[in-house]
Image (tube, rainbow, N blue to C red):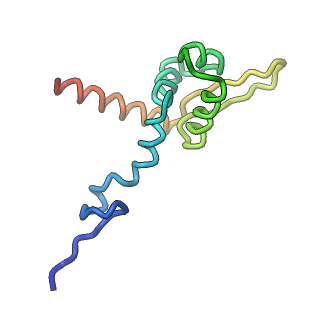
């Protein structure tokens, strides 16, 4: 009897260590509008307030920005810190996972540029 190749979630015959299917949710998240820009801004400024992000991104609505920030926070890439002041001050920063993702993306970018 011939050995049957293992399949992953996408149905390909790849070994589990070679399949990129587990990265699909992350790829979908960072592929959303403004997600990479937000990660880059937060990475470059370490701690950023909501209105600063909004002004730097330009054409983003407050609701879209709030949704994308919530998505990134839920994914564990950024953290939201609310300071108990009047008026409330909310700041966003990268988590360890977010910093690691930015390092990987920067490496990916450098490798792509080196091929050109």
Tell me which corner region of the image, top left, top right, bottom left or bottom right, holds residue 28: top left
Q: Is residue 86 positioned above or below 66 on the image? A: above
Report the side of 56 relative to 40 (left or right): right
Q: Quadrant of the N terminus?
A: bottom left
Task: Examine the rendered structure and indicate whether residue 1 appears above or below residue 39.
Answer: below
Q: Quadrant of residue 84?
A: top right
Residue found at the far right of this picture = 86
- Asked which quadrant contains residue 11, the reply is bottom left
Instruction: Give the camera-side residue of 86 and 33.
Output: 33
Q: Quadrant of the C terminus?
A: top left
Task: Give above or below for 87 relative to 24.
Answer: above
Looking at the rendered structure, the number of numbered marks drawn on it comes to 0
Q: Residue furthest bottom?
A: 1
Q: Position of residue 6 (x, y in %)?
A: 27, 70
Left or right of residue 97, residue 107 in this image: left
Instruction: Pick whichever, 59 or 50, lies toward us.
Output: 59
Q: Is residue 86 above or below residue 31?
A: above
Relative image position of residue 107 (x, y in whole percent)? 31, 30
Q: Name the residue at 49% across, 30% down.
A: 33
Q: Position of residue 42 (x, y in %)?
A: 53, 23
């Amino acid at each position: 009897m011939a050995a049957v190749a293992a399949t992953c979630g996408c149905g390909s015959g790849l070994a589990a260590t070679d399949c990129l299917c587990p990265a699909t949710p992350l790829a979908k998240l960072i592929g959303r509008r403004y997600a990479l820009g937000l990660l880059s801004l937060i990475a470059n400024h370490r701690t950023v307030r909501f209105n600063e992000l909004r002004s730097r991104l330009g054409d983003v609505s407050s609701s879209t920005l709030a949704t994308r920030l919530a998505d990134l926070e839920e994914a564990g890439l950024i953290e939201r810190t609310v300071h108990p002041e009047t008026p409330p001050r909310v700041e966003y920063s990268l988590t360890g996972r977010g910093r690691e993702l930015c390092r990987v993306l920067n490496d990916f970018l450098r490798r792509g540029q080196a091929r050109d």
